[in-house]
Amino acid sequence: MKDILDFIINFSAVLWEAMPFIVLGAVVAGILEEFLPQQAITKFLPKSVVPAVMIGAALGLVFPMCECGILVVMRRLLRKGLPLSCCVAYMLAGPIINPVVMFSTGVAFWPHGIGPEVLGLRVGLGFVVAVVTGLVVHQLWAKHGTALLHPVALPPPEPTLPLPMSDAPTARKPLSKRLGNISATALHDFVDITVFLILGSVLAAVAKLYITPDEVQYLSRDQPYLAIPAMMLLAVLMCLCSEADAFVAASFTKLHLSAKTAFLVLGPMLDLKLLLMYTRVFRPKLIGVIVACVVVQVLVYCVAVHLVYQMNGWSGLPRGT
Amino acid sequence: MAHDHHHHGESARDYFVEQLLTIFVVGALGAVGILMYRDGKLGYILAAPFHLPVLIGGIAVLVLVAVRAVAVWQEAGQTHARHDHAHHEHGPDCDHDHDHGPEHKHGHPVHLHAHDHPHEHGPDCDHDHGHAHADDKHHHDHDHGADDHGHSHDLTWVFARMMVLFFPVALYLIGVPNQGFSADRIAKMLTAETALNVDVGSVATGEGSVLSFNDLNDAAYDESKREALNGTVGILVGRFDRIADKEFRLYRLKMTCCAADTVPLKVRILTRSAVSGFNSGEWVKVKGEVRFVQQAGSAQFIPVIAVGDLADVQRTAALNEYE
């Protein structure tokens, strides 16, 4: 019984702390969906691959979606002709490089005195991982083309019907209609995200019953290079929303920053629920490539971060621990 | 042809069931956020700076739900009106065209799905999502999974999602969380520590100023703060946990953001003579000299309060669990 009550405290804590950020994200998503024409994005993409992929990785600043909602938007962009490499970069980096997630990451870690470090590393590494993966996918696309995509995600053939929603001039909508659309999108995103947030909070609360910060701290101190893959595995299993995961990572107060970064960078890119959702867009071959690229990069970069901290004698721990 | 769905009969019913369930459950979730703020239950799970955002979030959710409810109400009215128009009785002389061709217009508006549009679709959704097929042979030749449209009208999936969403509402209805972590959980957080076995010696006396666990633990990692506090007389209130006859620790819990990140803040108390009569977890006030003792084999210091007179160790009223 005590364990159940402790579980409920942990569960409620993670859920209700994240809730305001989910609501904010859903409302922002609703407003963008209503007022920003999707076609406008493609017009600003450069012709060459690297800058285009880099812009794709930064699209989250314009379309702030977390990983659950971003897949739907990304598939739409893919169907509208945005290159696969840009879409993958957006899908991977968007849940990290967006104002809501950056704000929540800062808020989670600011009291620990390492807010700027964690935020910088999360955004920086997230961007690099997404761009490199996007470029690898570009190479794969050149070789295999549409065979990499699920039929539902394929762009329509050239001579087919236009996409009237954004291409045709639309009549001016009354405010009530716009508000209705915004609330519909916002509620849809809210429900979608919150369902997975609740499931993730349950998993996180169960994990917290059996994993104490001290246990992970010992892992981090004695075998720091095990702490990084351990946190990566935790990120995959916990299925946390990117708007909430910073608060979970911050709760591991005695864990080295490199392991927290691994958790924060990998989690929004890869977890159990995302793997299932990817199958609605990509063929298994492409999923395998994306997973391998992301996992290897996060591991390598975070070990490098750990070494840099070690060489410079920086603690990599929250102030006061 | 364009891929058309008709919110017709069961489909329209499923759509409105989904919308009503969403409005009800999400509205309940928003209301719970507001009620938890009002009842003070957020104090068990969240740090104070996060209480107001939960209240604002709850209000925002209720506003969204209210706007959505009005929109669904209007959609229902429009659908009903069109349904009445479209499903009139057909007499033998009825000669108008129902257009049961590829675009299949039957009184209800044609509903074209993109399979990836992230917002909800009303039964009179008037835009094309561009799910186009070159010819009618492709009509409905692909599978429709639960996530095909970025949303689903499959009621099994809808009910499953709503049950998950209702879980925190159900917890609130049965009245939990209504306390902090259990004693067992706190004991697990505290972890065993060995006695320092340091001679107390002479102890400074005086009125003393009230100390916080946070300041003392911060100072342990900061030389200038250690120098400022070392040797001063301070008063500390916390919960009792025995280590040895002449040594115990006081602790309080610290919640940075939420209960999931709770950590115990500990300060070691050293006395000249054996301390007795205090139970584990009891709230105790201690007055003594602040010191910082370097741990054996480590560069780390731990904060210590040396007590000269056992009269300076007293039971006291409980404070908030979290500092």
Image (cartoon, coloured by chain):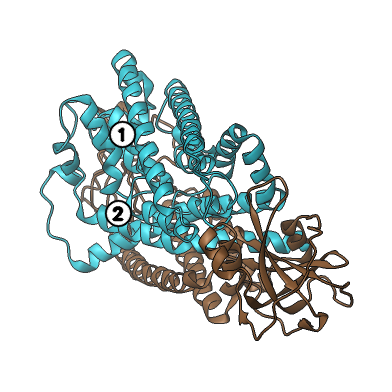
Cβ atoms at labels 1 and 2 below 8 Å apart = no
Residue B43 lies, in percent from the top left, at 58, 74
Badge 1: residue crowd in 10 Å (few <14, some 14–19, many ≥20): many
Report the chain shown in brown: B
Q: Which chain is cyan?
A: A
Mark 2 element type: loop
Label 2 amino acid? Answer: His
Residue at 53%, 58% (x, y): give it. B222
Apparent side of residue A239 relative to residue B174 in the rendered image (left or right): left
Residue named by callout 2: B108
Q: Nearer the viewer, mark 1 or mark 2?
A: 1
Identity of the amino acid at label 1?
Answer: Cys
Q: What residue is pinned by disc 1? A: A87
Closest to the observer: B263 or A321?
A321
In the rendered structure, the answer to whether residue B10 lies left or right of residue A4 reads left
The location of residue B122, given as percent across then percent down, is: 33, 57
Using the image as rendered, state which of residue B296 and residue B88 is in the foreground.
Answer: B296
